[in-house]
Amino acid sequence: AQWKPQENLMFYATWSRGFRPGGINRQPETPPYAPDFLTNYEAGWKTTFLDSRLRWNGAIYHQRWEGVQFSYLGPNSLTVIQNGRNANVNGIETDINYVQGGLSLTLSGAYTNAKTDGNICKAALVVDPSPDCSGERAPGKADFIVVPSGTRLPITPKFKGSATARYTDGAGASMNVD
């Protein structure tokens, strides 16, 4: 859905859902993995000011990730893929761009809060699809917590940003600063 109250201002909201298919593992005797699903709720804005020389865009989002697929190096250096618990990803992102003559300035930033939803237990990584995480980390006790609920997802920066300045003269020469 979108709403454009005036020529240089637009607000939008979107819902989307996607998935990665499941599959089989190359590691012998390792069970197959199921698909994972991501549902996205997003609201944002797109604007231009000063005769279109200044642009400011942004979005706020919430994502629900179900049955997160994760991979690790298994025996014989073969990658193993399994499903974990669910995760929630909340964030905001924005970018500002200003253009005047041959000068272009761009600034962008994002905050992402991506965390697991529910404990992940050792038994969940092996055989039990719904362990209660009541075991202890001891020999013969496979049902203990390896990732507590609320743990940040790996490879997801909490903050990120960039700034770029570019100047191009009338002869086609340019200079960038990032």
Image (cartoon, helix red, strand yellow):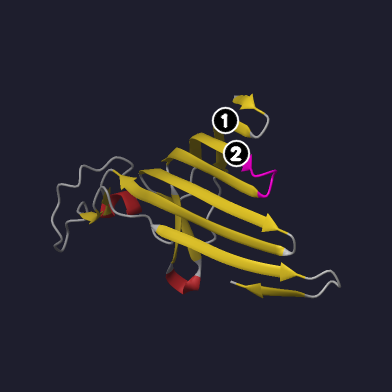
Percent position of residue 29, x then y: 45, 57
* Image quadrant assignment for residue 155: bottom left
Q: Is residue 44 left or right of residue 48?
A: left
Query: Which amino acid, mark 2?
Result: Lys
Magenta region: 46-53
Return the residue at label 2: 46
* Image quadrant assignment for residue 89: top left
- Identify the residue shown where x is 43% and y is 67%: 74
Relative height, residue 111 to residue 88 (above, below): below
Percent position of residue 59, x then y: 51, 41
Q: Is residue 74 left or right of residue 131?
A: right
Is label 1 or label 2 in front? Answer: 2
Q: Name the image quarter holding the C terminus.
A: bottom right
SS at circle 1: strand
Q: Is residue 146 left or right of residue 166?
A: left
SS at circle 2: strand
- 51 inside magenta stretch: yes
- Identify the residue shown where x is 70% and y is 43%: 51
Cβ atoms at labels 1 and 2 below 8 Å apart = yes
Whether residue 170 appears in this view of the structure is: yes
Percent position of residue 13, x then y: 54, 29
The label shown at residue 45 is none
Query: Which amino acid, mark 1?
Result: Tyr
Return the residue at label 1: 12
Point out the tag, 1 or 2, that comes first from the N-terminus. 1
Q: Is residue 155 left or right of residue 164?
A: left
